[in-house]
């Protein structure tokens, strides 16, 4: 009996302990939801809505950049056409019912109700939703509000765990749930209203749209889009139909990530719907759309009602009245120049084109016939920035009729530069230019020094409304946050230029805005190779590369050190300070030939990565990157890119070494105009190579070298080319490819052969072709190297007509420096291909060299190892008649005979 009693006591103790653990665990799970957010119903979701500070520019960009890239495209391109087909609430409900929301996948929601006398009635309506919110927060502005005490008492009596009272401003709320559902005063949602919004939020059509039942349009009646204060009238029209609007009112279902775009620093009098819709539209491009009203009683659960006695129409009239009063107030503050975040009409009103036709139909925003004019904006901070170079660029861009670009000028207002100062300075520089720029294109963001974190939101609004494609600003610490706009507005090019580079970018004025818009669409990589055991030449190259001007771009650098490089060279590479981008160092263990070192130094990561390849015998001009950037933009990113341009040379040659007969002094085209030549820039100086062409060169050289080292099925020689004798030189294979494809390289042409790069000494470890050229004779290498040394452009360079010629106006030279045309070069390449390849010419322009590598049929004699063959024969226990059949294998070959039309005919 004693044993049984002890067992019962043991069971009782275990049960008590288990119950105690369950109570503690439950309490911990209930309390921990205030700290640990969760995204699914199976986990506890935090109801904590902390008071937070306004996000700075970087945080704002990080928060909104993912949803911007989705919402901007989905709203403007896909959704409006669906709005026209769903004109009735029944259609909207049917569309929502295509989404299934089971409990395990149902997003979490925090409902927020504003303090008012009907709050208890609103809470009951929210609790009765078919999809109930996880938490309900009653937001009151003061602790003294009797509603606060009443709700807290009811909470204690009913032990409501998911309803809390929060003291503060609704504009400073953040939540860890997936959605925040804000219900305005006096609004009663139908039992299935939240379910409707939640399901619609999961559809592609409405995923990135702010939905509501009541809305309004804000328009400027004189169609003035200038952001100026005078001569304007703002009107607000209520909307109850299903269409895109400026503002939705009464109820707002917000994704939690959208909250980052809602600035809490606003005037206390701003209407809540205006504040939400304005910020979502201006900062992250979220459109507002009104749902159609219910047509019969069966739809009442999917709509909203009001505890007020006002009708829908009068309720919307009240909305517009409050908005008009608010806009009038901030305009009045602007006229008094008071210190307020919402100073001036230009910082607060949503200006957009009318979205409805005369008969009430929604206009599609992406109508093909509406062409958005190209517009560019120059942004500055201080008066010192508006110097001669800056004003020259502004006026040159404004005067270019062929660009047909609208020029805007904006000042942040944080420094000493204001609108009147801009007009005065421009007038003193060029009165005609200043008078021809409309005043409504000169803007003042009216920022104070203490409002630096407001720059991105205000500038974003201005850029969107003025439909700017390119923003150019002087790069400095105070404006670094502007670069975060690149994440918020991915289709806008934000170009930050260092002040000392402004003298060298007047060429930007001749490029179309559509080309400048692609400023950041490509990168240029620096690739340096060194094999010298003498550090000073490599140090000279590093210093010249360091001192170059990179226009504020990100430029990565890779250094390849041969096994012959000494310790000092390695230390120079390790200690190189490179603030322009990433630095990557490579050191080779096994020596290799110069051909492989050059060809393997770079392989493009994408079609937007270009490379400048230099070796330690070279030096570059401080302006070389500006030449590279301009050339690539001009000929690669214009409306009709030139596919047969292989690269851009930094060097203007004095001699032509392509002819197998002899080297010749080279006379470039007259007029100091840049020119196209089929010869690659090889031993003289560096060049920038284009990714697609370089990838094709890699494939071509790989196949050619493999063939030369094995059966030698193809014999490809460029007629009269010196490189035909250089079996293991990269120059041979590049000459072949460029000749066969009719490709060319762009060369600079300045007085006295001044260039963007030069060579001080020839490579130490040369290829076999140098022995043929007798460069090992005493003094020969040094004498030849002197011919390759040219002056460097140090301070500036001036092109004919101050711009690069159009493609059709560029002189064309062949491989040997003789005048030709692009058509002639292409025809020569096709003729050689017909002689060396069995495949027809590839017209696809896909940078695939396979059509050049089709060898004609050959009889290949394979030597058979007699011992191995005899051994196999003995092991093969077959019948005698079958053994005879296995003596020699049968091979199928295809023979091609060229016809008169040069098209291969299979036999």
Image: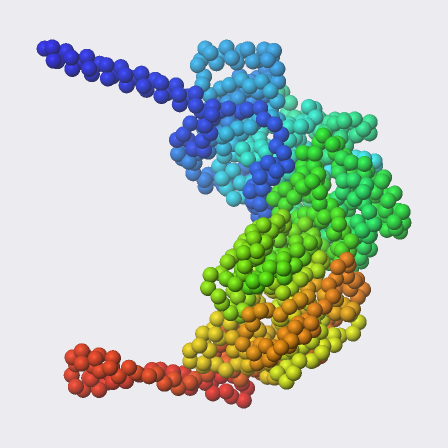
The quadrant the C terminus occupies is: bottom left
Please tell me whether residue 103 is drawn above or below residue 836 in the rendered image: above
Q: Nearer the viewer, residue 861 or 167?
A: 861
Please tell me whether residue 621 is drawn above or below residue 471 in the rendered image: below
Find the residue positioned furthest to the left. Answer: 1
Left or right of 269 in this view: 289: left
Please tell me whether residue 157 is drawn above or below residue 843 in the rendered image: above
Q: Residue at x 64, y 81 (%)?
A: 659
Q: Nearer the viewer, residue 473 or 662?
A: 662
Q: Residue at x 81, y 36 (%)?
A: 416
* Residue 139 visible in the picture: yes
The quadrant the N terminus occupies is: top left
Please tell me whether residue 16 is drawn above or below residue 401 in the rendered image: above
Q: Position of residue 333 (x, y in %)?
A: 78, 27
Q: Position of residue 233 (x, y in %)?
A: 79, 35
Q: Residue at x 54, y 11 (%)?
A: 150
Q: Position of residue 879 (x, y in %)?
A: 16, 83
Left or right of 63 in this view: 806: right
Q: How is the image coloured?
A: rainbow
Q: Nearer the viewer, residue 89 or 287?
A: 287
Numbered disc total: 0
Q: Residue at x 81, y 45 (%)?
A: 386
Q: Position of residue 619 (x, y in %)?
A: 67, 62
Find the residue positioned furthest to the bottom. Answer: 900
* Residue 440 visible in the picture: no
């Amino acid at each position: 009996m004693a044993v049984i009693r002890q067992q019962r006591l043991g069971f009782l103790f275990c049960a008590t302990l288990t119950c105690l653990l369950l109570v503690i665990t439950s309490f911990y799970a209930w309390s921990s939801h205030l700290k640990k957010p969760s995204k699914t119903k199976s986990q506890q979701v935090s109801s904590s809505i902390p008071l937070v500070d306004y996000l700075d520019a970087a945080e704002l960009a990080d928060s909104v950049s993912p949803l911007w890239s989705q919402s901007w495209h989905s709203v403007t391109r896909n959704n409006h056409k669906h709005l026209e087909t769903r004109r009735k609430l029944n259609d909207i409900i049917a569309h929502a019912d295509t989404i299934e929301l089971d409990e395990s996948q149902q997003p979490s929601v925090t409902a927020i109700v504003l303090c008012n006398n009907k709050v208890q009635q609103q809470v009951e309506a929210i609790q009765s939703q078919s999809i109930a919110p996880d938490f309900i927060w009653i937001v009151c502005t003061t602790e003294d509000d009797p509603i606060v005490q009443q709700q807290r008492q009811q909470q204690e009596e009913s032990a409501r765990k998911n309803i809390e009272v929060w003291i503060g401003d609704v504009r400073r709320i953040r939540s860890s749930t997936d959605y925040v559902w804000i219900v305005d005063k006096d609004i009663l949602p139908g039992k299935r209203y939240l379910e409707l919004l939640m399901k619609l939020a999961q559809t592609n059509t409405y995923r990135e749209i702010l939905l509501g039942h009541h809305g309004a349009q804000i328009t400027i009646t004189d169609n003035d889009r200038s952001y100026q204060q005078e001569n304007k009238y703002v009107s607000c029209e209520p909307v109850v139909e299903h269409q895109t609007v400026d503002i939705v009112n009464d109820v707002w279902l917000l994704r939690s990530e959208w909250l980052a775009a809602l600035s809490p620093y606003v005037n206390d009098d701003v209407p809540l719907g205006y504040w939400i819709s304005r910020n979502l539209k201006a900062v992250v491009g979220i459109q507002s759309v009104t749902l159609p009203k219910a047509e019969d009683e069966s739809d009442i659960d999917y709509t909203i009602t009001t505890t007020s006695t006002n009708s829908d129409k009068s309720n919307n009239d009240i909305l517009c009245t409050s908005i008009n009063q608010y806009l009038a107030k901030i305009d009045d503050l602007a006229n008094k120049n008071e210190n307020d975040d919402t100073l001036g009409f230009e910082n607060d009103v949503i200006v957009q084109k009318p979205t409805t036709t005369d008969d009430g139909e929604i206009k599609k925003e992406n109508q093909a016939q509406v062409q958005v004019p190209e517009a560019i904006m120059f942004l500055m901070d201080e008066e010192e920035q508006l110097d001669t170079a800056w004003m020259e660029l502004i006026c040159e861009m404004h005067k270019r009729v062929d660009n047909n670009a609208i020029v805007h000028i904006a000042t942040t207002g944080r420094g000493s530069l204001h609108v009147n100062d801009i007009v005065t300075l421009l007038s003193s520089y060029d009165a005609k230019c200043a008078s021809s720029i409309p005043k409504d294109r000169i803007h003042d963001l009216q920022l104070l020094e203490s409002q630096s974190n407001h720059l991105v939101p205000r500038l974003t609004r201005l850029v969107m409304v003025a439909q700017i494609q390119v923003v150019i600003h002087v790069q400095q610490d105070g404006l670094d946050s502007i670069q975060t706009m690149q994440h918020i507005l991915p289709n806008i090019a934000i170009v930050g230029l260092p002040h000392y580079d402004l003298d060298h970018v007047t060429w930007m004025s001749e490029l179309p805005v559509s080309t400048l818009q692609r400023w950041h669409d490509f990168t240029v990589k620096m690739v340096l190779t060194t094999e010298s055991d003498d550090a000073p030449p490599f140090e000279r190259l590093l210093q010249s590369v360091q001192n170059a001007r990179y226009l504020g771009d990100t430029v990565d650098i890779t250094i390849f050190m041969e096994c012959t490089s000494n310790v000092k060279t390695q230390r120079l590479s390790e200690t190189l300070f490179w603030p322009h981008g990433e630095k990557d160092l490579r050191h080779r263990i096994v020596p290799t030939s110069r051909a492989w070192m050059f060809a393997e130094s770079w392989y493009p990561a994408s079609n937007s990565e270009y490379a400048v390849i230099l070796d330690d015998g070279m030096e570059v001009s401080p302006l070389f990157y500006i030449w590279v950037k301009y050339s690539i933009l001009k000929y690669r990113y214009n409306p009709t890119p030139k596919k047969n341009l292989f690269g851009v040379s930094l060097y203007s040659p004095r001699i032509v070494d392509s002819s197998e007969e002899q080297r010749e002094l080279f006379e470039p085209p007259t007029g100091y105009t840049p020119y196209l030549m089929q010869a690659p820039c090889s031993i003289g100086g560096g060049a920038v190579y284009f990714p697609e062409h370089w990838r094709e060169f890699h494939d071509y050289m790989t196949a050619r070298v493999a063939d030369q080292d094995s059966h030698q099925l193809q014999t490809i020689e460029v007629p009269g080319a010196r490189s035909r004798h250089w079996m293991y030189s990269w120059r041979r294979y590049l000459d072949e490819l460029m000749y066969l494809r009719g490709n060319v390289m762009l060369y600079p042409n300045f007085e006295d052969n001044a260039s963007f790069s030069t060579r001080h000494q020839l490579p130490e470890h040369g290829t076999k072709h140098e022995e043929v050229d007798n460069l090992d004779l005493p003094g020969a290498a040094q004498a030849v190297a002197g011919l390759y040394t040219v002056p460097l452009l140090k301070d500036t360079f001036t092109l004919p007509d101050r711009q690069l010629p159009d493609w059709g106006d560029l002189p064309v030279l062949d491989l040997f420096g003789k005048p030709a045309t692009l058509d002639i070069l292409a025809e020569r390449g096709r003729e050689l291909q017909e002689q060396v390849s069995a495949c027809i010419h590839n017209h696809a322009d896909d940078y695939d060299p396979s059509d050049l590598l089709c060898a004609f049929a050959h009889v290949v004699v394979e030597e058979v190892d007699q011992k191995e063959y005899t051994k196999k024969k003995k092991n093969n226990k077959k019948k005698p008649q079958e053994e005879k059949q296995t003596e020699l294998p049968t091979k199928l070959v295809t023979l091609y005979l060229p016809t008169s039309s040069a098209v291969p005919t299979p036999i």
